[in-house]
Amino acid sequence: MSSPGPNGWPSSLPRRSFPVAFASVPFLLVAALLFVLPSAMPGLQAQLFSADRTVGAQQARVFLDCQVGRDCSFDHFRTEINFVNWVRDRADADVHIIFTSTGLANGGRQYSIDFLGLREMEGLDDHLTFTSTGTDSSRQTQDGLTQTLRLGLVRYSVQTGSGQFFRIGYDGPTSASGSGDGGNGDGSAGAEDAFYDPWNYWTFRMGLSGNMDLRETRTETRMNPSFSANRVTPDWKIELSSWMNMRRESRQLSDGREVRNDFTSWRLSTLLVRSVSDHISVGVDLGARNSQQRNQRSRVNAAPAVEYNYFPYQEATRRQFIAHYAVGFENSRYAEETIYGVFSETVPQHRIAVQYRAREEWGNAGLGFDTSQYLHDASLYSMGVAGDLSYRITRGLELNMSGEAALVNDNIHTPAASIPDEDILLGRQSLPSSYRYQASLGFNYRWGSSFANVVNNRFPRAVR
């Protein structure tokens, strides 16, 4: 054994051998890095890119264009969907959402939700639907609409770089082939049973409502029974309905006299429509009713009709251009002798109606024309035109217009005797008029913050 040297190393070993070997280690590490780094660069680049997307990710800006009534709760949507920025002006939005809806035979509604990409997302459009039933509560409908909105907005959030913040799950049933419920393994077993409807698409509704208002000098009671039956399929639309209004009213005047206003009105209607194509339908409209204001103890009408829609009926909630023609008869029994000296009559009648409606990114528009005429006397006719427009002129500025004009020369029901002032004041009867006009014009302008994400429910209007 050799004795240790001054530095603690054995004296028989070369003193510089270990330092030289140790000095070569950095060169080996550098060489290894130069060899490994090129192969690792794609992964590093992807990681850097992902980190850059995370830093630069922003929430999609969404403008909600919703006119569906109480089911379109802007506050609810803003509260439940917090991964987008809700804005008040379309000019600031990346996504424009248009809500439309149509009623269903079962009392529910089908909501159509169009997602329109703007600015950098132009052309990235989508369309989703949600269907509620007549037995759904308002909360169930709200939750369903919210979920549909949420699903539709995910793709736009991913487009802005927020996709890594989502977690995807599924809580629904598994496929038929893997459920072990006796299927054929191809998902086709039980397909007929899945579409079996014991009611054959018929839905029924019966209702009874009433109200009472009792005061010292005035009493009013009202009762409204109703019944309806509907069947809607792609080929047929059948609607049956009945309604009654029983009203009893008493008012005390300043001199102590009592004035009563008691009446009962009722209405029956039947509509049968057959789909011929995506643009054409034929049908018949049957009805019966009474009207104290129109001097009619009863009126029965029947009118076969044909209708043409320039746009496919599937687009009717967004746009429609309809021409409708009906011809039939009207039978009336009058409470008092009319100015034509009759107590009852049956007369032929026809009607033409044309209507255009659109719900677009720039706003809403509608224009309609209709005219009807009694065929036994060409001078007895009425015609009218009505339209409305809501147009977004520029950021925050909106124009609203509506108007209606009509010429009325078909008052065959007018009583020959003078109408008492008391009946006019109480609304039991009305004086005939040869025309009707109505118009409105308005502007709305909004400025300030465009963001609408905060919901504050304190001091609601109901308690103020």
Image (cartoon, helix red, strand yellow):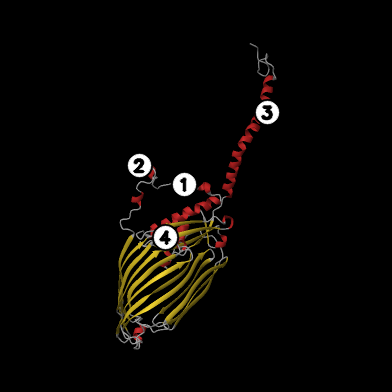
**Nearer the camera: disc 2 or disc 3:** 2
* Residue at the spot of label 1: 168
Q: Residues within 10 Å of mark 1 (few under 14, many from 20)?
A: few
Residue 282 is left or right of residue 166, and the answer is left
Please state the horizontal and vertical placement of residue 107, each as a whole percent of the image. Answer: 36, 62
Can the viewer see residue 449? no
Mark 2 → mark 4, Cα distance in angstroms: 33 Å
**Nearer the camera: disc 3 or disc 4:** 4
Query: Any mark on residue 180, and which?
Result: 2
**Nearer the camera: disc 2 or disc 1:** 2
Mark 2 → mark 3, Cα distance in angstroms: 64 Å
Please state the horizontal and vertical placement of residue 334, each as a whole percent of the image. Answer: 31, 82
The answer to whether mark 2 and mark 1 are in CB contact below 8 A is no
- The amino acid pointed to by label 4 is Gln
- The amino acid pointed to by label 3 is Phe
Q: Quadrant of residue 417?
A: bottom left
* Residue at the spot of label 4: 110
Q: Secondary structure at mark 3?
A: helix
Mark 1 → mark 4, Cα distance in angstroms: 26 Å
Mark 3 → mark 4, Cα distance in angstroms: 72 Å
**Nearer the camera: disc 1 or disc 3:** 1
Q: Residues within 10 Å of mark 3 (few under 14, many from 20)?
A: few
Please state the horizontal and vertical placement of residue 106, each as a whole percent of the image. Answer: 35, 61
Query: Any mark on residue 27, and which?
Result: 3
